[in-house]
Image (spheres, helix red, strand yellow):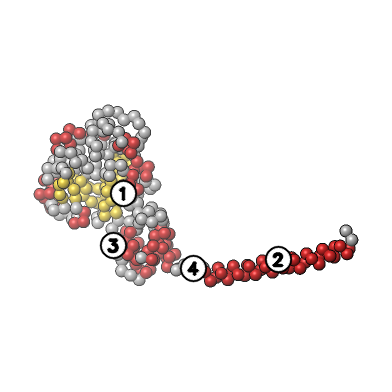
């Protein structure tokens, strides 16, 4: 290539390159200006709220994790009382950050298992040899005699990522020292045995049975079942019997001489303490 030809190429290429550089620079400046104009500044209180939470990401509040919950609380302070693991202490901290009054009771919600039947207490029509899953076993008739009781195959245990549930002699048992109140166990139980209860005290009274069969049928199927006799309801107003089963009204929960007598007089001994 001659010198004249090279000079000709450069005379074309250099202006084109400068033009492209100019266009690129202009677009970069435009994007920067657009970003500055459109970006949303995060309220610093979001980080403060997040740091006040226990960082368990358990989902008990109804959100995916503590970060999502912090943003939700900023948008709606009425959600403050939903952090079950944090309880009243966290609720107070969140309220202080937002300069509002705490909402909710602040009492933690914990699971109670409405069954007290260990393997020795249960009757069986046959031997279950299927998948080790409560959901699978619950779909089959005539395995465990009681169709309301704990199957003891551990769906709740596998659902809990905090190692707060274990199967002890065929019965789901909560380790309250590890429980965060995430509700995973309650959702996993195919028989609806696990109820989330507001623990206004470290230990709560529970009717550990879920059978709605009549007294004769219940006794034939299980040695640890409620027979719906109603003696508890005669001792305390927090008890009521419906569908052959005693239940506690936790909305009006209290402990007094009546509740103590109800526990003592229960012939099936299904009124028990649960908690830590």
Q: Position of residue 79 (x, y in %)?
A: 33, 62
Compare marks 4 and 2 and give the one earlier in the sequence: 2
Q: Is residue 25 left or right of residue 50?
A: right
Residue labelled with disc 2: 20
Residue labelled with disc 1: 176
Residue at image x 33%, y 50%? 183
Residue at image x 21%, y 54%? 250
Indicate which disc residue 109 carries: none
Compare marks 1 and 4 and give the one earlier in the sequence: 4
Q: Give the mark toward the camera: 4 or 2.
A: 2
Residue at image x 33%, y 39%? 135
Marks 1 and 2, how far apart at CA: 67 Å
Marks 4 and 3, how far apart at CA: 31 Å
Q: Position of residue 86 (x, y in %)?
A: 34, 58
Q: Tell me the quadrant of the picture where the N terminus can be found.
A: bottom right
Residue labelled with disc 4: 40
Q: Give the mark toward the camera: 1 or 4.
A: 4
Compare marks 1 and 3 and give the one earlier in the sequence: 3
Compare marks 4 and 3 and give the one earlier in the sequence: 4
Q: Position of residue 88 (x, y in %)?
A: 31, 61
Is 238 situated above or below 50? above
Marks 1 and 3, how far apart at CA: 22 Å
Marks 2 and 3, how far apart at CA: 62 Å
Marks 4 and 2, how far apart at CA: 32 Å
Residue labelled with disc 3: 104
Query: Considering depth in this image, is 222 or 62 the residue closer to the camera?
Result: 62
Is 44 situated above or below 256? below
């Amino acid at each position: 290539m001659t010198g004249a030809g090279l000079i000709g190429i450069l005379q074309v290429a250099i202006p084109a390159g400068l033009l492209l550089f100019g266009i690129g620079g202009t677009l970069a400046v435009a994007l920067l200006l657009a970003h500055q104009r459109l970006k949303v500044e995060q309220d610093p209180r979001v980080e403060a709220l997040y740091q006040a939470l226990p960082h368990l990401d358990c989902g008990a509040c109804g959100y995916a994790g503590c970060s999502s919950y912090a943003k939700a609380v900023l948008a709606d302070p009425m959600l403050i009382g939903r952090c079950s693991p944090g309880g009243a202490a966290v609720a107070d901290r969140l309220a202080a950050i937002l300069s509002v009054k705490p909402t909710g009771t602040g009492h933690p919600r914990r699971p109670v298992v409405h069954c007290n039947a260990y393997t020795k207490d249960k009757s069986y029509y046959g031997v279950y040899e299927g998948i080790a899953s409560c959901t699978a076993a619950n779909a089959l008739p005539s395995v465990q005699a009681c169709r309301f009781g704990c199957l003891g195959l551990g769906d709740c245990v596998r659902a809990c990522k905090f190692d707060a549930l274990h199967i002890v002699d065929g019965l789901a048992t909560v380790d309250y020292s590890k429980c965060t109140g995430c509700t995973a166990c309650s959702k996993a139980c195919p028989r609806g045995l696990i109820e989330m209860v507001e623990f206004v005290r470290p230990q709560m009274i529970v009717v550990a049975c879920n059978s709605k069969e009549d007294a004769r049928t219940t006794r034939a199927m299980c040695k640890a079942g409620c027979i719906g006799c109603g003696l508890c309801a005669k001792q305390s107003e927090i008890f009521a019997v419906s569908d052959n089963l005693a239940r506690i009204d936790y909305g009006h929960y209290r402990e007094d001489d009546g509740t103590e007598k109800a526990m003592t007089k229960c012939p099936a001994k299904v009124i028990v303490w649960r908690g830590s």
